[in-house]
Amino acid sequence: MTVELRQTRLPGVGTKFAFITAHGSRVAVIHHVDGTQELYVFGRVDDDEPRAVLLLDDDEARQLGAVLGGAYERPKIVDELEMAFGELAIEWVEVPDDSPAIGRTLAECGFRARTGVTIIAILRDPEPVTGAQPTDVVQRGDVLVTVGKLGQYKEFRRLLREGPFDGAARSAE
Amino acid sequence: VVAAETLTLADLAVTIAVLAALGLAAGRFGLSAIPAYLLAGLLLGPNEPRELSLIEPSEVTAFLAELGVVFLLFFLGLEFSLDRLLRSGRHLGLGGSIDLAVNAAVGIAVGVAAFGISFAAVILAAAVYVSSSAVTVKGLIDFRRLADDETDLVLAILVFEDVVVAGVLGFAAAGGGGVSPTLVAVAKALAFITASLAVSRYLSRPLDRLLDRLPSEFFLLFVFALVVGLAATAKALGLSEAIGALMAGIVLAETSVRAEIEERFLSFRDLFAALFFFTFGLSIDVEALGEIGWLVALAVVLSAAGKLGGGYGAGIVGGFTRRQSVNVGAALVAHGEFTIILADLASKNTEIPVGDRADLVAFAGLYVLATATIGVVLMKESKRIGRRVFPVPTLVQKE
C-alpha cells in the first residue's frame, strides 16, 4: 500500500522525489531551492522524454497537493467521507436547503446526544465558524465539519435531512 | 584625450543594457548567459575588434569584477557542507574520480603544450578540467533533465570538480616562482581552509543566533561585511579573495538562515557576476594568443572528447545505460565560471610571466565561448544522439 518514494538531493538545484505508479508511469517532483516546484510525468518507466512537465509556484503546488491528498474542501461536488482514521472519521456534510435544522442552534438539534456525531466547525461565507459552540445557529448553505464514527453517519444525515427537532426555528437569513 | 581611467554612470548604463540584451538573446537560443557576457566584454573592450571600444578596464571595473568573484564563490560555499557532500551519495567518489583522471590528463597535456612545465600550465590544466556548474545546471533545467536518473551523477561530478578546483583557487593567485614558494602557497591555502572549517564548527551556532535576531536591513549589511571581510583576510594572507569568500559561504551554510541568505543575495550575485564576466571579456586580447591560437582549437576538441568519454565511462561504471551515459558526458562539455575565475586570478599573479598571463586570459575567454556554446548544443541533442548511436534493438534487427 505504501508507495516507495525515492528522495535525492540535487546539489545546486534542490531535491527530487520520485516514484513509480502501479500502472508503470514514473512521476518525479523537483523542489527547487527558490521555492518553485516542478512535476515530471513519464508515460513509462524507461521513457526518454517526459510526457508532461508542470512548473508550479509554491501556492499552486500546495493547492494541488491538497486536492490530490483529499484534504481539500469540496462541498459543492461531494459531501462524502473525507478522512478516516480507523473507525474515526472527519466528514464535511452539506446542510440540505430544506433541512429542519436551519434556524436552530446546535444545542437544540442535539446531534451529538442523538447520533454521537460532533460538529467541530461550520464552513460558511463570508466567515467560517471554528470551534462551533452549542449556541451557534445552523444556516442555509452551511457545510458542517464533523467528527464521528463511520457507523453514525447514516443516522446523522437522516436527522439533518428530516428532523424532528424540538422548539421553533428562528427565521433563517 | 586618452580614454579616461574611470567608469562613468553612462558607461555603466550602456554596459548593463548591452549585457541584458545579449544575455536575453543567448537565452532565446537556449544558451547560457556567460558566453554572452564575455562576448559583450570582447566587443566593447579596447582590444580587437576596435570599432565598438567604449569601455577601458580600470580600477573601477576591476573592483566590480572582484565583487563578482566574491559572490560567485560565496554562493558555491553556501551549497557546500560536509553533511551534504556525504549525502550526495555513491556517485560522488567514483564518477568524480573517473572524470578527474581523464580530464586532468587532457588539461595537463594542453597546459604543458602551451607553457612547458610551469605554474601557468597547472592553472591551464585546472581551467581545462573543470566544467561549468552554472551552464550545466541551467541546461538540465531548460532541457527538462532534472527527473532523469543520470542527472544525479552529473551533479555529483560537478560537486567533485568544484571541491578539486576550490583547492587550486587557494593558490592560483600566489603560487609559481619556483617550487618552494609554490609549496608554501599551497600549504597556506590548506591551512586557511582547515582553520576556517574548524572555526566554523564553533562559530556557526553563535553566528546563527546573532543573525537570526538581526533586523533585516542589518542582517544584509552584516552578512555582506562577513563575506567581504573573509575575502579580504584571505587576500591579506597572500591567498585569493575567492577562497575567502568560499569559506564565508561554507561557514554560513551550516546556519539556519542559509535559505534567507541565498534568497537575499541572489540578485547581488547575478549582477556582479555579469559584470565580472564582462570585465574579463574586456581584457581578452585575441591577438595576444599568437602562436598558441591553434591550441585553443585543439583544447576544445580534446576536452570535448575527454568530457564525453569520461562522463560516458562514469555513467557505465555507475550502472547507467549506454544512452544515459551519453547524456552524462554531453552535460559536462560546457566550461564557464571556474575556467574564467582561475584565469582571472592567475592574470594578477606576478610570478607568472606577463606574456603567459595574457595568453591564459585569451585562452580561457575563447575556450569558454566555444565550449559553453558547443556544450549546450550537445546537451540539448544528447538524447537524440544516444538514440542514433545506441538504437533500441527491434525484432527486425534481431533476425
Image (tube, rainbow, N blue to C red):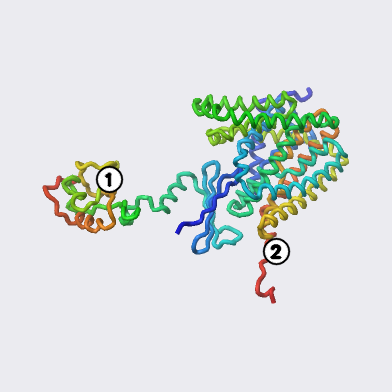
Quadrant of the image occupied by residue B82:
top right
- Residue B88: tell me if it is visible: yes
Determine whether the residue tagged by mark 2 lies in a helix, strand or loop. loop
Q: Which mark is residue B179?
A: none
Mark linked to residue B390 = 2
Same chain check for tags 1 and 2? no
Give the percent coordinates (x, y) of residue B46.
Answer: 78, 32
Compared with residue B91, is residue B187 higher up or lower down, i.e. above or below?
Answer: above
Q: Amino acid at mark 2?
A: Phe
From this viewpoint, which residue is outermost toward the bottom? B399
**Distance of mark 1 from mark 2, alpha carbons?**
62 Å
Question: Which quarter of the rendered picture does the N terminus of chain B lie within?
Answer: top right
Image height of B129 relative to B149, above or below? above
Classify mark 1: helix, strand or loop. Answer: strand
Residue B191 in the image, given as x and y percentages of width and height: 71, 30
Residue B181 to residue A21: above or below: above
Q: Hey, which residue is sitting farthest left in the picture? A: A167
Residue contact at pointers 1 and 2, CB within 8 angstroms: no
Give me the residue at 85% from left, 32% from top: B179
Residue at screen point 80% across, 50% down: B302
Instruction: Find residue A73 and report its horizontal and vertical position in percent.
Output: 35, 50
At which x and y percent is residue A43?
Answer: 54, 62
**Left or right, A146 with reference to A60:** left
Q: Nearer the viewer, residue B277 or B84?
A: B84
Q: Given the image, what chain letter belongs to the residue carrying mark 2?
A: B
Say what amino acid the circle numbered 1 marks: Ile
In the image, taking residue A22 as reference, residue B149 lies left or right, namely: right
Between B265 and B322, the residue placed more toward the observer is B322
Q: Please name the residue that numbered disc 1 is placed on.
A: A120
User: Is residue B112 positioned above or below A52 on the image?
Assistant: above
Q: Is residue B35 visible?
A: no
